[in-house]
Image: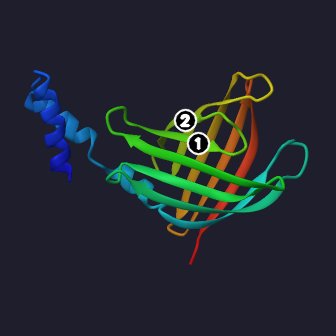
Amino acid sequence: MKKLLVLIVLLVFCANGYTQTPEEMKAWQEHMTPGKYHKWLSSFDGEWNGDVKMWMDPSQPPVASKMSTKNEMIMNGLYQRSTHTGDMMGMPFKGEGMIGYDNSKKEFINTWIDNMGSGIMIMKGTLDETGKVLLTEGTMTDPMSGKDMGIKQILTHISEDKHHFEMYMIVGKEEMKTMEITYTRKK
């Protein structure tokens, strides 16, 4: 399959009078080949139960709920699609994320959409030296102002059957924890 894709890319460039050097072909090949970070993402594949804590006001106790998540690597193992269902604040919740590791930029890129907003969150980040904690940062739309606000997410790999997620909103220079989810693999 990979060879077919490389052949198609070559044919498209050649048909337009463009030829690639061996170095350029090698760069394309490296860009489209899953590596160790894609393998790390695939460790989250499967179906998960999520115990959710959500803070609307940091001075108040969190609201607890449950969610169900399915993660699957797609596109030859380059990206992971994540589908979430459950209840949030007493309402039905559906959300989808897409995350991948860009071999050329050397960073994770993550997007998120859900039925509780019309914006798209876009985050970028890196895995720490331990290989267990992924920190991504980016923006989402603040519904009150219509402007972007900062967000930070921390995904911690605890074991093959458990991981932990935290989300923070960044208002000015202040970080406010808004969500925490503990995921346990469904048996």
Binning the other alpha carbons within 10 Å of mark 2 as few (below 14), some (14 to 19) or many (20 upward) gives many
The residue type indicated by label 1 comes to: Trp
Res 51 quadrant in image: bottom right
The type of residue carrying mark 2 is: Met
Crowd rating for badge 1 (residues with CA inside 10 Å; few <14, some 14–19, many 20+): some
Give how far across and how far down residue 128 sits, in percent. Answer: 48, 45
Which of the 4 image quarters holds residue 88? bottom right
Q: Residue furthest right?
A: 60
Q: Residue at x 8, y 32 (%)?
A: 22
**Quarter where residue 40 is shown:** bottom left
| Residue at 73% over, 43% down | 116
94 w.r.t. 51: above or below? above
Label 1 belongs to which residue? 112
Give the residue at mark 2.
123
Q: Secondary structure at mark 2?
A: strand
**Cβ atoms at labels 1 and 2 below 8 Å apart:** yes
